[in-house]
Amino acid sequence: MGNGVCSRRQRRIFQCLLLVTVVCGMMYGGLMSYEMHKQLRRTEATALKYQQHQESLSAQLQVYEHRSRLEKSLQKERLEHKKAKEYLGYKLEAEQSLNKEKNQHDELKRQYYELNEQHQVQGEDHSRLLDEHRDRYNKLQQAKEVEVSQLKGN
């Protein structure tokens, strides 16, 4: 009779341990899902912040500024672009290691490529605007030189 009681106790302990293991596994899965969604939201917020920053810079570049100030701003923007790209690449790798579901993985990859394409297009726009400003500056400089030579001639 003692063996029967011990056997039941052992079975109860085993069942409790199995239940605790299943509950812990479910909690771990829920925690992993929560963390994955939290990191996805952070990545999206970073991407939105970077896109807004790009739009702000485009608006600033439309205003005529001195050549040295424009070049300095462009260099700073390229550095921030590089840092943001590295940061997004790191976050994308972290998301891929935690996220085994194919649909979410494909969505993150698509967002990354869209942002990269937008950054390239905006970079080309920045280069074009910089060239236009340089042309304007050179024309104004030439006009100034002509005017100065005319005034010296008089």
Image: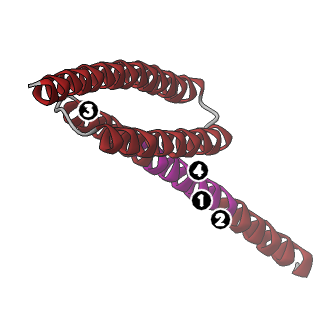
Residue to which mark 3 is pinned? 55
Viewer-nearest of labels 3 and 1? 3
Viewer-nearest of labels 1 and 4? 4
Density class for disc 1 (Cα within 10 Å; few <14, some 14-19, many ≥20) is few
The three-letter amino acid code for the residue at tag 2 is Val
Q: Secondary structure at mark 1?
A: helix
Q: Is residue 39 magenta?
A: yes
The residue under the point 42% across, 25% down is 123
Residues at marks 1 and 2 touching, judged by CB atoms closer than 8 Å: yes
User: What is the x, y in percent for residue 59?
Assistant: 19, 32
Viewer-nearest of labels 4 and 3? 3
Residue to which mark 4 is pinned? 29
Rounded to the nearest angstrom, the CA distance separating label 1 from label 2 is: 5 Å
Mark 1 or mark 3, which is nearer the start of the sequence? 1
The three-letter amino acid code for the residue at tag 1 is Val
73 to 55, vertically: above or below: below
User: What is the x, y in percent for residue 88?
Assistant: 53, 40
**Magenta stretch, residue numbers:** 21-41
> Count the marks: how many?
4
Marker disc for residue 23: 1
Residue to which mark 2 is pinned? 20
Viewer-nearest of labels 4 and 2? 4
For this view, does 150 lie left or right of residue 109?
left
Mark 4 or mark 1, which is nearer the start of the sequence? 1
Q: Nearer the viewer, residue 122 or 152?
A: 152
Rounded to the nearest angstrom, the CA distance separating label 3 from label 1 is: 48 Å
The three-letter amino acid code for the residue at tag 3 is Glu
The residue under the point 65% across, 60% down is 19
Mark 2 or mark 4, which is nearer the start of the sequence? 2
